[in-house]
Amino acid sequence: METKLVVGNWKMNMTNAEATANVQAFVKHVDARSDVDVVICPPYMSIGRVRELVKDTHIKVGAQDTFWENSGAYTGQVSAPMLAECDVTYCIVGHSEKRGRFGKLETDPETLCYFKETDHTVNLKLKSLLFHSINPILCVGETADERNANQTESVIEAQLRGALAGLDPAELYFFSVAYEPVWAIGTGNTCESGEANRVCGLIRRFLGEILDEDVASMIRILYGGSVKASNSRELFHQPNIDGGLVGGSSLDSEEFSKIVRSA
Ligand code: PGA
């Protein structure tokens, strides 16, 4: 892939006032050049504000999740047409924190039932996003226990097959996959760059088998999990890594701008 993609996932952080200050500073740090695709995914509440602040730049706005129905009695949910109307052009789907798989469990285990995303619901969300011309960023990755049991490949293949079931390869040119080893998310334990590169290559091979080789070669494969300015250059220059999905480090405008520049 020629152009790298760097996505900031703010998770449940930043009030509107904080988002404003952060994006104003970030826009000043980042070059006006558009040789890296940059996306900021704020909480739903700040999407409009962030959109307003980046409208004269090449920075795009993304969402952290969506729901698969367009409208209806689904309290608390936000649909793809609602996102599209707000100029949201990317959307993260199947993040491990939505699947109830946490690198560092700070939530009460009894409340994990609120995070039960499955491969099937991911699949429904992907279909809705593609129908509304929003670029999905599909997250896949293994937990520490799965890695220790040598299940990394089988877990990722099953997540990809479940998520992509019934999708038309011709619709997937603007699709991205993020390899996010769960044990690396929010823990400071970044996956070693050679290993991240190996798994991203494996993901492209699975995509070739599930979809077709041409489409698989167009899909950008990102790495996510404790990306920082000090490790992003090495990660992003691996041949199979087309950019990054950045959580904690995207909350600091200076750190995030260094990560973008390293791409
Ligand atoms: P992190 O999160 O960079 O804070 O590890 C990455 C992610 O969850 O997308």
Image: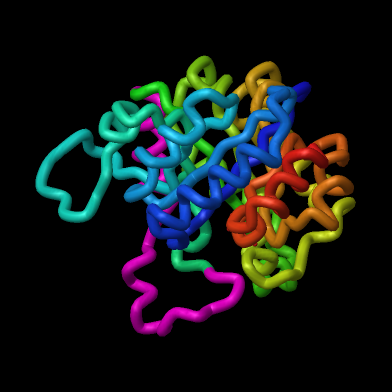
Q: Nearer the viewer, residue 20 or 251?
A: 20
Which segment is the magenta one? 102-131
Q: Quadrant of the C terminus?
A: top right
Q: Which image quarter: residue 236?
A: top right
Give the residue displayed 78% in from the left and 39% down from the top: 261
| Residue at image coords 61%, 46% | 25
Position above or below: 144 against 123: below
Residue 157 visible within the image:
yes
**Is residue 143 visible to us here?**
no
Residue 146, image x and y in percent?
66, 68
Residue 185 in the image: state x and y as whole percent: 64, 64
Total numbered labels placed on residues in the image: 0
Q: Residue at x 72, y 54 (%)?
A: 255
Q: Nearer the viewer, residue 108 or 210?
A: 108
Quarter of image, ligand 1: bottom right
What secondary structure is the magenta-colored segment mainly? helix
Residue pictured at 50% horizontal, 54% vertical: 95
Residue 105 lies in the magenta stretch: yes
Frontmost residue, 229 versus 173 = 229
Apparent side of residue 233 relative to residue 258 in the rendered image (left or right): right
Q: Is residue 260 magenta?
A: no
Residue 206 sits above or below residue 245 on the image: above
- Where residue 189 appears, x then y in whole percent? 76, 69
Q: Is residue 49 above or below residue 208?
A: below
* Image quadrant in which you'd find residue 66: top left
Q: Position of residue 122 (x, y in %)?
A: 41, 45
Q: Quadrant of the N terminus?
A: top right
Color theme of the render: rainbow
User: As drawn, is 85 to the left or to the right of 21?
Assistant: left
